[in-house]
Image: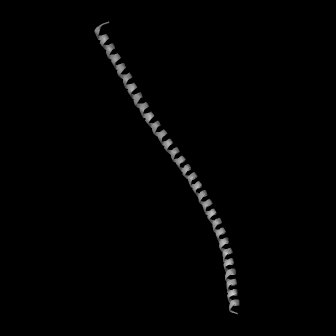
Amino acid sequence: MPRPEVLENIKEAESDADELVAEAVSDRDERISDARTQAREIVAEARAEAEELTDEHLADAQAAIDEEREAILEAGRARREELKGAVEGSIDEVVETIIEDVKEAVHAQA
């Protein structure tokens, strides 16, 4: 094989190799770009899911707090009614005692 043909074959092989390298670099860059895009989408989805779960947990916690608050208020109302009944009964007893004391005092003066 004459020298010019050998040189031409080498140049052709180098050109083919350069094209293959360029294609590989381009393919690599495209894959990296796609992976980054996919990673951003995954992060965005995870973030949205985390926010949704946070909202659900907060709503559940608020419902539990509201339920506990209502139970405490109801217990307080019931206790207030008990005390109110006890006080009203005591007032009747005190009034009866005062009336008896006044009657005794009136009878003692008579």
Quarter of the figure with the N terminus: top left
Of 68 and 79, the residue lying toward us: 79
- Residue 4 x/y as whole percent: 29, 11
Q: Residue at x 62, y 64 (%)?
A: 76
Quarter of the figure with the C terminus: bottom right
- Residue 32 x/y as whole percent: 42, 32
Q: Quadrant of residue 68?
A: bottom right
Query: 58 above or below 34?
Result: below
Q: Residue at x 38, y 27 (%)?
A: 25
Q: Quadrant of residue 19?
A: top left
Of 88 and 69, the residue lying toward us: 88
Judged left or right of residue 55, residue 34 is left
- Residue 90 x/y as whole percent: 67, 75
Residue at the farthest left position: 3
Q: Residue at x 69, y 86 (%)?
A: 104
Q: Residue at x 50, y 42 (%)?
A: 46
Query: 89 above or below 104?
Result: above
Query: 49 above or below 20?
Result: below
Of 12 and 91, the residue lying toward us: 91
